[in-house]
Image: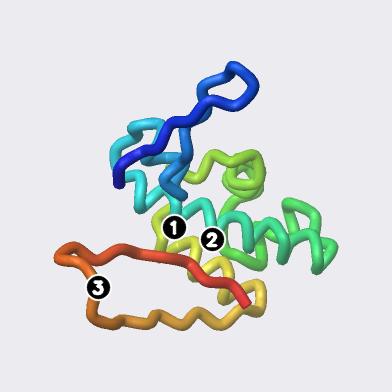
Amino acid sequence: MSKRTRTVEGIEVETGSGNVFADLGLPDAEKLKIKSGLVIEITRAVRRLGLTQEEAGRRMGIAQPKVSAMLRGDFTHLSERKLMDCLNRLGYDIEIKVKPARRAMGHLTVAVR
């Protein structure tokens, strides 16, 4: 996606692509965006349920230090599948929807209701 640049009050502003990981030039940016969306929802669930990190870890099937790292934004050690499993264990249904792409290359998104 091409980036647009404009000047606001003498400051050059670049419009983002919608994926901060891609904008930063990180490898696997789309995967990181999906994982971060899942982690955000896990964080909301843990807070909503009033769980300690230890309780959340037991419920999700991961050790407390991994829960702590995940809640701080370090989710590199967890796969998308494991994050979805964590959400299932916190009482969420996961629905995967596959449809033809509008462009030659499709993309992944996380939609939360």
Whether pointer 1 and pointer 3 mark residues with C-beta atoms closer than 8 Å, the reply is: no
Label 3 sits on residue = 102
Instruction: Pick out the residue farthest to the right.
Output: 50
Question: Looking at the image, which residue is at 62% across and 56% down?
Answer: 40
Q: Quadrant of residue 69?
A: top right
Residue 104 on image: x %, y % = 15, 66
- The answer to which of 104 and 7 lies nearer the viewer is 7
Residue 41 lies left or right of residue 111; in this view the side is right
Circle 1: residue type = Ile
Q: Residue at x 54, y 58 (%)?
A: 37
Q: Residue 34 got which mark?
A: 1
Most distant residue in the top direction: 10
What's the CA distance linking mark 2 and mark 1? 6 Å
Residue 38: assigned label: 2
Say which amino acid is labelled 3.
Arg
Left or right: 8 as drawn, with respect to 33: right
- Secondary element under disc 1, as helix, strand or loop, is helix
Q: Residues within 10 Å of mark 2 (few under 14, many from 20)?
A: many
Q: Position of residue 34 (x, y in %)?
A: 44, 57
The numbered disc on residue 64 is none
